Image (cartoon, rainbow, N blue to C red):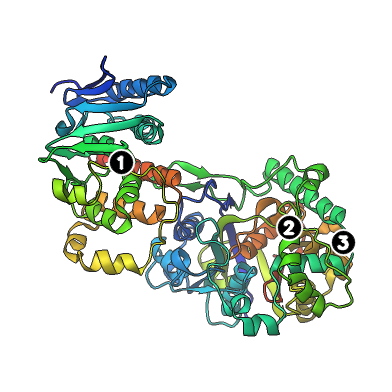
């Protein structure tokens, strides 16, 4: 599989190349972001390239003692993009999922072509976002819709994503700190109406339990605390899979 | 009457009760269940033998709602036959839970029980539970309700405790708590809190400010001056206490109990059950008592609860080697010392809630464990725990080492 990399082009874009991304690939992206942050002249940055290859993670979580460092790096990248005064714009098409989707979601704007589909297929594959995207999806989509897309393997096609203002729209940077308390609403609206999914995945797919726990535990927390909770559960899932192997 | 013995007492460290606190990320149910789990592990308990788990919790809503004691039992992997009940006597809930657990043993209806408490003040903030006393005007007006901070300042005004008096008490609480931690006096009771990955979240009381001085406290603004003066609350207090000319606002964040997260559990049982489980009794619960007092000044409960429990135990304050009086506010302890005419060197010898924080539902059971540890360390015999309680109450418990 072609080694993945990120390159800062002469035209001022970040180009995603290759398919398989290891720790060093993401470290190089982090270095690029740091450089851009120090360069006050930059206003807009386009991120282009192989979004539809998922940015497959390669060998990043193979050693238990390196999980913390890797997860911190991945969250650091998306937090840097998200909090930057630079306007990052991701240009996507086709199926965008996994780490590629997370990278895109952290940008101020996702410019999407008509064949775009944002695939939140985490629970089906027993995976959870590693870049802090649960908090981000809640911020962008609101609490109820976020629950739905994160837990039901939903695919947001171009039209729906446009209507939800996820794509081709500037994402509001203001973080809503007043998230609702976890309440009966969740049980009524999600578990009841999606009981088939709930009974299929609960206790069978650890990722499903983890995503639910993240949403619950972070439901009263500030954004950055939510990120930390995500990291803790991501580590839990990775360790579980390492033991299984 | 069957005698109730304490076999073990443990507590979590107290995490700052805000979003930056080390226990903020952990839900209250996990705080409670980790404590119960640890109690099971270190006593090698066959949990089928536990007759009941009683946990104090002052805001039993949202994450802390729906009988947190029973859910904690299940989450701690206790046998499903173990029931759990959550009780609320405001700030004394943790002690009251132990008293109820002991009462079950003393009455012969239980052989082995657990008392304790939990409060995650960072996740379920104070006031979350609402309640008629504070919010229903027909009740609040009739009972001359004022917030507890106004009561504390009223108490200080009535008994002439100056800002220096209360600040000096607070500085000493910080010093004593810091020294106790440095000398590892709490090591027997503290359980470290780890997350689901085995990473350490907290192993110490993180509120302590060892650098606290009279000068640093002097810079703090009184916390209740503005609401007292501008919301008419001082006037309500003075209506009830017209002999006071005014309310001297002396309490602030540095001489009041801190907002923290934490949980505690105490294992209580009969002598026979202890023998059966090969557990060594550490102390006997000699007597306990709760009392209602005047609700506007609210915080004088400890002296009255103590007098009541002394009568019940046929004892007096001179029979007590060490006291734990909850430091809800500095004036509460100063008044207690004065009312019972006891020496400060017998009271809160390792600091208290001003330094380490007051996780409302858990503090009483934490104090019980702290007292027991210190009695053992000093090889003393008898101790008393007491707490002032919202709406004008007090709870006190006397224990005797065996």
Tell me if residue B4 comes above or below residue A166 in the rendering: below
Residues tagged by mark 3 and mark 1 found on one chain of the structure: no
Say which quadrant the C terminus of chain B sits in: bottom right
Q: Which residue is mark 2?
A: B375
Q: Chain of mark 2?
A: B
SS state under label 2: helix
Q: Which corner quadrant of the image does residue A97 belong to?
A: top left
Residue located at (38% from left, 35% from top): A79
Q: Is residue A26 left or right of residue B228?
A: left
Q: Nearer the viewer, residue A67 or B266?
A: A67
For mark 1, name the chain: A
**Spatial CA span between label 3 and label 1:** 59 Å
Q: Position of residue B141 (x, y in %)?
A: 68, 82
Sort mark 2 into few (<14), some (14-19) or many (20+) by Cα contacts within 10 Å.
Answer: many
Image location (x, y in percent) of residue B19? 52, 49
Sequence-wise first label, 2 or 3: 3
Q: CA distance from mark 2 to mark 1?
A: 64 Å
Residue at (15% x, 31% y) in the render? A53
Q: Nearer the viewer, residue A99 or B70?
A: A99
Position of B306 with respect to A234 (left or right) is: right
- Residue B274 vs A7, above or below: the answer is below
Q: Secondary structure at mark 1?
A: loop
CB under 8 Å between discs 2 and 1? no
**Image position of A172 with respect to B319: above or below:** above
Q: Is residue B264 visible?
A: yes
Residue that badge 3 annotates: B161
Image quarter where the N terminus of chain B lies is: bottom right
- Residue at disc 3, secondary structure: loop
Please name the residue that numbered disc 1 is placed on.
A170
Describe residue B382's horizontal placement relative to residue B198 as left or right. Answer: right
Q: Position of residue A12 (x, y in %)?
A: 29, 19
Label 3 marks a residue whose chain is B
């Amino acid at each position: 599989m072609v080694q993945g990399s990120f390159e800062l082009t002469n035209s001022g874009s970040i180009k995603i190349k290759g398919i398989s991304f290891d720790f060093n690939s993401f470290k190089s992206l982090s270095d690029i972001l740091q450089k851009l942050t120090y360069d006050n002249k930059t206003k807009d940055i386009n991120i282009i390239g192989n979004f539809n290859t998922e940015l497959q993670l390669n060998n990043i979580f193979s050693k238990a003692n390196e999980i913390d460092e890797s997860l911190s790096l991945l969250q650091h990248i998306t937090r840097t993009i998200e909090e930057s005064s630079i306007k990052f714009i991701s240009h996507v098409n086709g199926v965008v999922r996994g780490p590629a989707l997370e990278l895109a979601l952290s940008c101020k704007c996702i410019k999407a072509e008509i064949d775009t589909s944002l695939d939140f297929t985490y629970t089906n594959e027993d995976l959870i976002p590693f870049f802090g995207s649960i908090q981000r999806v809640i911020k962008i989509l609101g609490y109820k819709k976020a629950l739905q897309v994160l837990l039901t393997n939903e695919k947001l096609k171009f039209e729906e994503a446009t209507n939800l203002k996820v794509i081709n729209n500037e994402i509001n940077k203001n973080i809503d700190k007043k998230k609702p308390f976890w309440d009966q609403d969740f049980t009524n609206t999600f578990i009841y109406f999606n009981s088939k999914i709930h009974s299929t995945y609960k206790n069978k797919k650890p990722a499903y339990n983890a995503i639910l726990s993240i949403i619950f535990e972070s439901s009263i927390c500030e954004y950055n605390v939510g990120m930390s909770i995500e990291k803790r559960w991501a580590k839990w899932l990775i360790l579980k899979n390492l033991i299984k192997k | 009457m069957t005698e109730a013995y304490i076999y073990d007492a443990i507590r979590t460290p107290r995490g700052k009760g805000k979003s930056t606190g080390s226990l903020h990320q952990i839900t209250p149910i996990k705080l409670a269940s980790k404590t119960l789990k640890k109690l099971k592990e270190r006593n090698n308990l066959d949990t089928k033998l536990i007759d009941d788990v009683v946990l104090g919790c002052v805001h039993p809503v949202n994450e802390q709602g729906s009988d947190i004691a029973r859910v904690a039992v299940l989450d701690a992997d206790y046998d499903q036959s173990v029931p759990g009940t959550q009780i609320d006597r405001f700030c004394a809930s943790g002690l009251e839970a132990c008293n109820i657990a002991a009462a079950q043993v003393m009455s012969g209806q239980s052989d082995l029980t657990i008392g304790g408490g939990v409060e995650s003040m960072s996740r379920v903030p104070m006031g979350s539970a609402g309640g008629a006393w504070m919010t229903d005007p027909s009740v609040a007006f009739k009972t001359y309700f004022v917030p507890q901070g106004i009561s504390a300042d009223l108490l200080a005004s009535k008994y002439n405790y100056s800002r220096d008096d209360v600040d000096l008490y607070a500085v000493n609480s910080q010093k004593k708590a810091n020294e106790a931690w440095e000398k590892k006096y709490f090591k027997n009771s503290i359980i470290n809190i780890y997350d689901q990955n085995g990473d350490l979240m907290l192993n110490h009381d993180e509120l302590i400010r060892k650098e606290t001085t009279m000068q640093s406290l002097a810079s703090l603004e009184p916390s209740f001056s503005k609401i007292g003066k501008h919301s008419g609350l001082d006037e309500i207090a003075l209506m009830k206490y017209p002999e006071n000319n005014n309310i001297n606002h002396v309490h602030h964040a540095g001489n009041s109990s801190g907002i923290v997260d934490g949980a505690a559990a105490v294992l209580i049982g009969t002598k026979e059950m202890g023998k059966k489980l090969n557990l060594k009794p550490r102390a006997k619960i000699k007597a306990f008592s709760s009392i209602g007092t005047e609700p506007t000044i609210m915080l004088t409960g400890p002296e009255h609860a103590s007098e009541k429990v002394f009568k019940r135990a046929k004892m007096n304050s001179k029979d007590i080697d060490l006291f734990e009086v909850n430091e809800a506010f500095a004036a509460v302890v100063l008044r207690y010392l004065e009312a019972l005419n006891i020496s400060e060197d017998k009271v809160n010898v390792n600091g208290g809630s001003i330094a380490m924080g007051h996780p409302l539902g858990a503090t009483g059971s934490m104090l019980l464990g702290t007292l027991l540890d210190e009695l053992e360390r000093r090889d003393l015999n008898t101790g008393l725990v007491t707490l002032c309680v919202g709406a004008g109450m007090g709870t006190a418990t006397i224990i005797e080492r065996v």
